[in-house]
Amino acid sequence: MSLRETALFDAIEATWPAAALHSHGPWLVREGRGGGKRVSSVSAVRDWEPDDIPAAEAALAKLGQEPLFQLRHGEAALDAELAARGYDVIDPVDVLTCPVSTLTADLGRLDTIPSWPPLAVQAEIWASGGIGPARLAVMERATGPKTALMGRHRDRPIATGFIACHGPIAMLHALEVVPEARRQGIARKMMQGAANWAARQNAREIAVLVVRTNEAAQSLYRSLGMSPESHYFYRIKKGHA
């Protein structure tokens, strides 16, 4: 990977951290404790051999996790080896970024409210979208500047998102808008509120992770001036998806 991509992936790991990291030969094994694929997968951190793959599978099984590998740019050999072993591609993800200054905006004081720890109503909004306690625990583990942003409309909470900084990069995770408030420009306003907060932390750019097949989110973020800088995907063993 390029230095640029390395910086982005360092920010991803820091702002959405695993519960623990384990080294097994050439593999980095993330212990997720229910926090989702990003914190429950294996990555290659140095040269590997095909005979090393069972050790990664065993390490995941010991943690009670599925056989799941995260692959990034330049890992064609590992991709091919896993495919030959019966691993299917799942959830290709784009890393989209733009300068913070592109999204900063003059918002009403109560349009987007930063709060840490999250308020109970934010946890309720996340829960309605399937983001439960295990993912809230991921947010709690992030050690850099962070906040839970609450979006309001007509005097009631209708959106929430988690944003954290790693160096000059601010990353927004877990953006959730209640169903009845969607397609009203709320997500755009949340991104602007996130950029305003990031600017106060002296971050220079803002990033989001978007599943490639999520056409609505892809369209939204690109309309905001965000563009893909990198990507990754997973391979999971057949029978475990």
Image: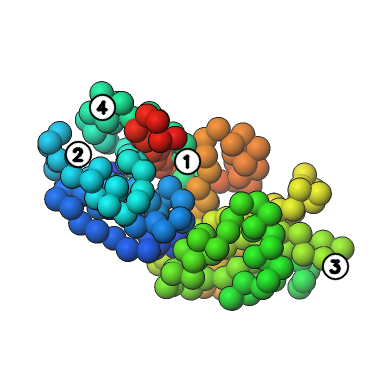
State the SS at label 4: loop
N-term mark: 1 or 3: 1
The CA distance from mark 2 to mark 3 is 53 Å
User: Residue at left 14%, top 50%?
Assistant: 25
- The residue identified by callout 3 is 155
The CA distance from mark 1 to mark 3 is 34 Å
Along the horizontal axis of the image, is 111 left or right of 18?
Answer: right
N-term mark: 2 or 3: 2
N-term mark: 3 or 4: 4
N-term mark: 2 or 4: 2
Asked whether residue 59 appears in the rendered view, the answer is yes
**Neighbour tally class for label 2: few under 14, some 14-19, many 20 plus, Cα within 10 Å:** some
Along the horizontal axis of the image, is 145 left or right of 238?
Answer: right
Along the horizontal axis of the image, is 22 left or right of 121?
Answer: left
Q: Residue 47 at what x, y percent from top left?
A: 14, 43
Q: Which mark is residue 85?
A: 4
- The residue identified by callout 1 is 94
The quadrant in which the C terminus is found is top left
Between marks 4 and 1 in the image, the one whose residue lies nearer the viewer = 4
